[in-house]
Amino acid sequence: MNMLVTGGAGYIGSHAVQRLLRDGHTVVAVDNLFRGHAEAMRLLEPQSGGRLIFHESDVGDSTRMERLMHEYQVDTVMHFAALAYVGESVDQPLLYYENNVIAGIRLLEACDRAGVGRFIFSSSCATYGEPSAEHIPINEDCPQSPVSPYGQTKLDFEHALRAWGQARSRAGEPVSIAMLRYFNVAGADRSGLLGEDHEPETHLIPVAINAALGKRDGMAIFGTDYPTPDGTCVRDYVHVEDLIDAHVRVMDRVKPGEVRAYNVGIGRGYSVREVLDAVRRVTGVSFEVREQGRRAGDPAALYNDPSRIERDLGWRASVTSLDEIVDSAWQWMKRNPGGYAGSRG
């Protein structure tokens, strides 16, 4: 197939590009490089067999997106491009609506004009907000009630995408649509080529690894009095390669006229203390941890009920060991302490 991958130079998008190339697809990767890494595309080029086409562009440029879709006869879009910092979304909500909703609608307009037949959307468990205890573990029928502009923009685009799909079906031109709501994505490509490199880094596992590497002066735990076994927040961590496998499976299964939604997580939670213990075990390094008060809006526990995706797609996380997830991230960050900037040869 001929694929267009938005946000293709980002953390998750680049891993998707790698998997799709391995599977023999032609990939048009689009990224405005606001937070993506051109270096990830350079690293993938030698293994692409000429099937990777990278364009530095904004997905909100509907005319250019349509031109690319026609030029490369794109039949499937995987849409990863988005801003994804919860705190930043609270401070700059309009920036998030512009990038995550308005630009996404411009992309759908291009898809509509180009006759794209399949659209896979990178959504988030943030659309569920702070579910009550009876909804933990979280399944796809849990009420969606975001508590941040980030989560709201993901939900708003879900609504737009569903409405577009319904309109296409009424017009006799049905499109296949899937929305994958991720839990905490972690780890790195186990071949060692790609990894996670954000600025600023806010994700727990790379923050802890940076502390182990001496790149930061220890780290903080926010809240030690939650109603969890050790008092710290519990989250579901899914390996990035398993996440991409879920995209590939749903891409192959979703039928024209369908709009499917799936949660993607391993189905169990790990506490902050468990994550830090895993980082210490894997790296062999101890680092300072400062205990601080709770942050507003941090639910005690969020983890997935994977029943629907297991039943419908036969998908199940292949990596459920926290140490294995951490080790894949550690191996890449240890070899590339400067991130992608340090991997340039």
Image (spheres, grey):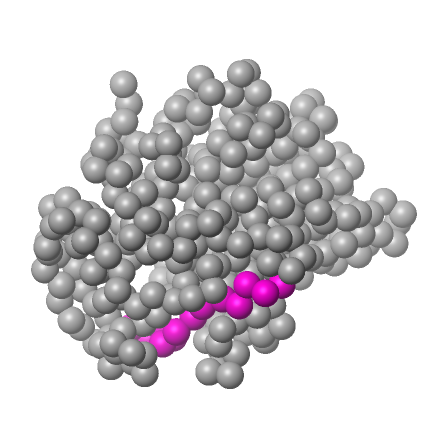
Residue 271 occupies quadrant: bottom left
* Count of numbered labels shown in the rendering: 0
The residue drawn where x is 26% and y is 64% is: 274
Toward the viewer: 228 or 221? 228
The residue drawn where x is 52% and y is 57% is: 264
User: Is residue 196 highlighted in magenta?
Assistant: no
Residue 143: x and y, percent?
A: 59, 75
Q: Is residue 98 visible?
A: no
**In this picture, residue 64 sits left or right of residue 118:** left
Residue 158: x and y, percent?
A: 63, 59
**In this picture, residue 4 sits left or right of residue 42:** right
**In this picture, residue 129 sits left or right of residue 88:** right
Magenta stretch, main secondary structure class: loop
**248 above or below 235?**
above
Q: Is residue 171 visible?
A: yes
**212 above or below 219?**
above
Toward the viewer: 123 or 58? 123
The residue drawn where x is 71% and y is 47% is: 253
Q: Which residues are magenta?
A: 295-308
User: Is residue 307 highlighted in magenta?
Assistant: yes
**90 above or below 281?**
below
The residue drawn where x is 52% and y is 79% is: 135
Residue 184: x and y, percent?
A: 41, 58
Question: Which quarter of the rendering shows the C terminus?
Answer: top left
